[in-house]
Every structure is written in C-alpha cells, then in structure tokens.
Amino acid sequence: MAYFQQLLLNVNKKPLGFSGSQFRDMVDMKISNAYLPNDHVQYQHCAGSAPQYRGYPCALWLLFHTLTVSQYQVGSQQINVTEVPLAIKNYIKYFFGCKQCSDNFMKETINISQLDSQNKHQAIIYLWKVHNNVNKRLQGQISEDPKHPKVQFPNRYLCTTCKSINNSQNNDDYDISKTIDFLLDYYSRKNIDISLISNKSRRVEELSSEQERLVSTAEYKAVKLQRVAYKNENLQHVEYR
Ligand SMILES: Cc1cc2nc3c(=O)[nH]c(=O)nc-3n(C[C@H](O)[C@H](O)[C@H](O)COP(=O)(O)OP(=O)(O)OC[C@H]3O[C@@H](n4cnc5c(N)ncnc54)[C@H](O)[C@@H]3O)c2cc1C
C-alpha cells in the first residue's frame, strides 16, 4: 500500500502530465519498505528478435499448455477436464493486460463447458486447437515476430508424423493421436529446464517460504492465544454462576 500511495503522490505532483519514460522512472522507485521488482527478464524460448516481440504472452502460452499436460500426467484416474481451461480463461479475463486479446480469447473459448468429460486428453487438445486458431488469426499482424512467423503447431520439423497434410493451416489435417503423443512429450516435466533459474530467484523463493513459515507460526500462536483467552473467559463464567 505504501508503494501505491507514494506513486499516487508522485503522479499528483505533475498536474501538467508526464512522458512514458518519466512514468517508468516513477514506477521503478524504491522506498524503504516497498518496491516493484524491475529486473529485466531474459527469456530463453520466448526471446524475440526485438523487445516488442514474444516474451510474456509467449511464456503464458507455454505455461498453459504445460498445465493441461501436467494435469493429465499427475492427475488421478478421474480428472475434471474443464478445470484447467476454465482457470486459464478466468486468468486471461481478469489479469491479462492486453484487453483486445482477452476479449478475443473470451469469444474463442465460449464452448469450454461442452468438453467431453470422458476423454482425458480433451483439455490438452482443446488448448492446442484454440492456440492454433489464434496463430492463424495473427498471421501477418503487427505483433508477429518476423524471425518467428505464426505457423500451425507443431510444424513438420518438430513432429514429422503429426500432420497428415504438409503446410496445412487447418487443425483437422493433424493426426490427433500422434499430436497428443507429441504434446504429452513436448510439455512434459522432463522438458522443463530449471537449470537457468538463477541463485537469486532461489534465494527469493527461500525467503518467501521462510516468510510463509513465520506468518503461519504467528497465526498459529494467535489462534492458540485466542483459544486460551476463550477458555479463561468460559471458566470465569462457570465460576461466577
Ligand atoms: C490467451 C492469449 C490470447 C492472445 N490473443 C492475442 C490477440 O488477440 N492478439 C494479439 O496480437 N496477440 C495475442 N496474444 C499474443 C500471441 O498469441 C502470442 O503470444 C505473441 O504474438 C507471441 O507469439 P510467439 O511467436 O512468441 O508464439 P506464441 O503464439 O506465443 O506461442 C508460444 C510457443 O508455444 C508453442 N505453440 C505455438 N502454437 C501452439 C499450439 N497450437 N499448441 C501448443 N503449443 C504451441 C510454440 O513453441 C511457441 O513458440 C495472445 C496471447 C495469449 C496468451
């Protein structure tokens, strides 16, 4: 809260307005007890040929596909096939900064509730199809990285047997069973490279779990104290009666 109050104060100090880079400097401020992390993220798979390309939205897609595959791979016999797609949809609805993308995605995922609950691959295939439709829609658009043109996925270099018709722009021209096998492998746990997570991020993780532990210990103690107080109060009532 302290951070946002200070940011608001700084914004109000400039009634005549400010440039984008001046606002960037304001956002990057560090006050004693709060600041936003402003490390410039270095993407690996999602690195674009220029800063405006790929990056965060690309990483989101990778995370979403990984979630659908992981639910299938670690889930029990009975999985709720709409659970992950609905969570993704709600995340995009409320937290994705690109409003136009979010609106498009709401329309493109209108039929989630109709997924076949008997088919455990449904969520994986559903998201793959939706993503390929988005790829098709964005072909040649301003957001397309010229070094990474929008094509139907997987291309024949990634999966030689997935496509029944080469260079097809249609999801129907994929062999679904081979595509499922490919996606299960491509987005599986063994393909997640965590060696690039820096020591710094590990330290941040360690610190936040330490913080969580302290908070839960404090909460536990507070609940215990409340119980003791409640017990004492009741005992007093008993004594007075
Ligand atoms: C939910 C959502 C909606 C979006 N809507 C819009 C929009 O309306 N307009 C707009 O301009 N941008 C939109 N974007 C951004 C856009 O889809 C791309 O993420 C962005 O242009 C970067 O593209 P990219 O080349 O890095 O590949 P991305 O499309 O981001 O794909 C990332 C990676 O996923 C893999 N992949 C590609 N296709 C598939 C597939 N079908 N199945 C499984 N894996 C696949 C590939 O390895 C690829 O490198 C949206 C992003 C998201 C997450």
Image (cartoon, rainbow, N blue to C red):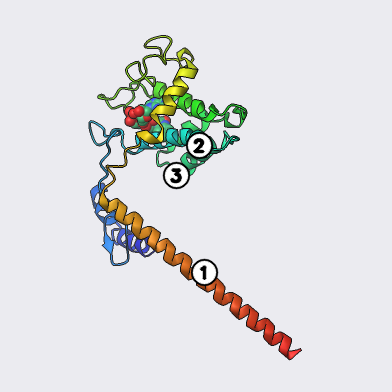
Mark 1 sits on what residue? Answer: 220
Residue 133 got which mark?
A: none
In the displayed image of the protein, which residue is found farthest to the right? 241
Q: Earlier in the sequence, mark 2 or mark 3?
A: 2
Residue at 48% from the left image edge and 42% from the top image edge? 91
Residue at 68% from the left image edge and 82% from the top image edge? 234
- What is the spatial separation of the Cα atoms under label 1 and label 2, in whole angstroms? 32 Å
In terms of depth relative to the viewer, which is nearer, 76 or 68? 76
**In the depicted structure, whether residue 124 falls above or below residue 36:** above
- Give left or right: position of 152 versus 14: right
**In the depicted structure, whether residue 48 falls above or below residue 42:** above
In terms of depth relative to the viewer, which is nearer, 151 or 19? 151
Residue 95 got which mark?
A: 3
Corner quadrant of residue 116: top right
- What is the spatial separation of the Cα atoms under label 2 and label 3, in whole angstroms? 22 Å
**Within 10 angstroms of label 2, few (less than 14), some, or many (20 or more) residues?**
some
Residue 148 % position (x, y):
28, 25
Q: Quadrant of the N terminus?
A: bottom left
Q: How many marks?
A: 3
In terms of depth relative to the viewer, which is nearer, 22 or 199? 199
Residue 59 % position (x, y):
36, 37
At label 1, the amino acid type is Tyr
Asked whether the residues under the numbered discs 1 and 3 touch, taking CB atoms below 8 Å apart as contact, a structural biologist would say no
Residue 71 got which mark?
A: 2
Secondary structure at badge 2 equals helix
Q: Nearer the viewer, mark 2 or mark 3?
A: 2
Residue 124 % position (x, y):
49, 29
Q: Earlier in the sequence, mark 1 or mark 2?
A: 2
In terms of depth relative to the viewer, which is nearer, 117 or 130? 117
**In the depicted structure, whether residue 128 falls above or below residue 214:** above
At label 2, the amino acid type is Gln
Viewer can see residue 209: yes
